[in-house]
Amino acid sequence: MEKSLEVGVMEDRDEWVHDSSVDHRGRPPFRAATGSWKAAMFIILIEFSERLSYFGIATSLMIYLTKVLQEEMKVAAKNVNYWMSVTTLMPLLGGFVADGYLGRFSTVVFSTVVYLLVV
């Protein structure tokens, strides 16, 4: 009887993650619910959409600035460089906010909502 009770307790302990991981509500997660492709597919889709829009804009931004907005080539090149710099450095700001204030899950949700509203 005692042996089966120990096995039941050990099986119950194996259901939870014990490496100080917590879910977005601060609770320890179930082992079966972690490490799957649920969140990875969401992140891959967002990353694909972001890269598609980035390269779509980058290919025609110089033409748009010079032909439509009538900017000089020098000013247009400077503005394109500023735009590329900001889009390259924004993940650092997002990482800082995620690590320091909001957490991973909240930051991904917040930035996705902002991205969908702005783009």
Image (cartoon, rainbow, N blue to C red):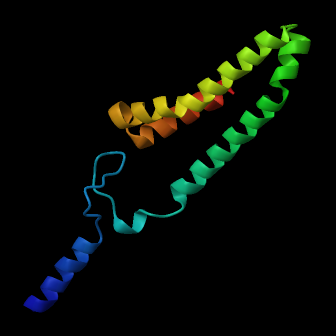
Q: Position of residue 55 (x, y in %)?
A: 76, 36
Quarter of the picture containing the C terminus is: top right
Q: Nearer the viewer, residue 20 or 54?
A: 54
Quadrant housing residue 105: top left
Q: Is residue 8 left or right of residue 103?
A: left
Quadrant housing residue 17: bottom left
Q: Nearer the viewer, residue 80 or 54?
A: 80
Q: Position of residue 2 (x, y in %)?
A: 8, 89
The residue at 42%/42% (across/down) is: 104
Q: Is residue 14 left or right of residue 57?
A: left
Q: Position of residue 29 (x, y in %)?
A: 33, 59
Q: Nearer the viewer, residue 88 or 74?
A: 74
Q: Position of residue 15 (x, y in %)?
A: 30, 71
Q: Is residue 26 left or right of residue 37?
A: left
Q: Nearer the viewer, residue 47 or 62?
A: 62
The relative height of residue 118 versus residue 51 in the rendered view (above or below) is above
Q: Is residue 25 left or right of residue 87?
A: left
The residue at 28%/52% (across/down) is: 27
Quarter of the picture containing the N terminus is: bottom left
Give the number of marks.
0
Quadrant housing residue 88: top right
The residue at 59%/55% (across/down) is: 41
The residue at 29%/47% (across/down) is: 26
Q: Residue furthest front?
A: 74
Q: Residue furthest right?
A: 67
The relative height of residue 3 versus residue 119 in the rendered view (above or below) is below
The relative height of residue 101 versus residue 69 in the rendered view (above or below) is below
